[in-house]
Image: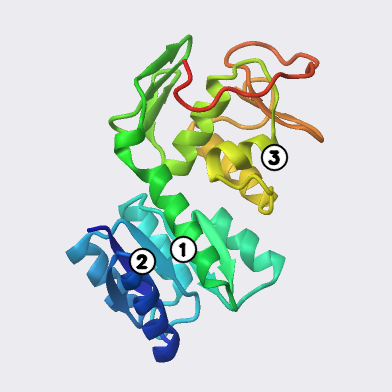
Amino acid sequence: MTCLLVVEDDPDLGLALRVLFTRAGYEVVAADDGQAALRLLFARRPALMVLDLVLPGLDGWDVLDRTRDLTDLPVLILSGRTSPAERVRGLRSGADDYLCKPFDHLELLARVEALLRRSNPEQWRGEYVEAGLRLVPERRSAVWQGHETRLSAIEYRLLEVLVRNRGRVVTTEQLLDLVWNDPAASGRERVKFAVLRLRRKLAVGEGPGDPLESVRGLGYRYRGDEPSEQPEASEPPEPPGAL
């Protein structure tokens, strides 16, 4: 049974979340403060964390930072902080999704299911190799110019979509559909910050040597070692594992 770690200090909401996830078929472990959350993270190794930001002791930001030092399990922030700045900070800090309170129960379950589906190693495809880059699904890593780095499930899937559509522009809307399972394109900022994290991990900066090219007003394309070119209209992108 898939185990979820719910980190929420409000006892009524914490109980409601445990009931919701249990009825949906998940095993649930719960913490009401940051220290307890990290202890359960070590002890139970959950498949996904649902994280509140306002916690006694270690707050949610500290928990997220320490979690990312240890593991790349999916983290969904569930918070009453609804400002765009807070949502941007959460995604930039390594959260895979951000849902504001109050929330719809069915939407929360759908987001959890989508995150778990994307992080399932049984769905990873074979290695992809080309000049300068190798994708290694069993380690969920990328080797760029001889340097290997581990990626989160979202980062790996994003890079795989771009690489398998080399030279073609993949729009932000297409990336949200293929990587985040968000065909309504309701979280466009997620793409921007996921690309920023990828660039940091690959040790490249936006510019002539960046294999991930930003195409203003459209989206992104993977060009590897090729120089930047004027983008052409692209066909529908290949999904992960299509080759």
According to the image, label 3 marks what residue? 173
How packed mark 3 is, by other alpha carbons closer than 10 Å (few <14, some 14-19, many 20 or more), is: some
Q: Do labels 1 and 3 touch, CB within 8 Å?
A: no
Q: Do labels 2 and 3 touch, CB within 8 Å?
A: no
Q: Residue at x 28, y 70 (%)?
A: 28
Amino acid identity at mark 2 = Ala
What's the distance in space between the residues labelled 1 and 2, CA to CA? 8 Å
Q: Residue at x 45, y 35 (%)?
A: 156
Amino acid identity at mark 3 = Glu
First-in-chain label (2 vs 3): 2
What's the distance in space between the residues labelled 1 and 3, CA to CA? 22 Å
Q: Is residue 58 above or below residue 3?
A: below
According to the image, label 2 marks what residue? 24
Question: In the image, residue 152 lies at what x, y percent?
Answer: 41, 43
How packed mark 2 is, by other alpha carbons closer than 10 Å (few <14, some 14-19, many 20 or more), is: few
Question: In the image, residue 118 lies at what x, y percent?
Answer: 42, 43
Where the N terminus falls, by quadrant?
bottom left
What's the distance in space between the residues labelled 2 and 3, CA to CA? 29 Å
Amino acid identity at mark 1 = Leu
First-in-chain label (1 vs 3): 1
Q: Residue furthest left?
A: 43
Q: Do labels 1 and 2 touch, CB within 8 Å?
A: yes
Disc 2 vs disc 3: which is toward the camera? 2
Disc 1 vs disc 2: which is toward the camera? 2
According to the image, label 1 marks what residue? 109
Q: Is residue 212 left or right of residue 110?
A: right
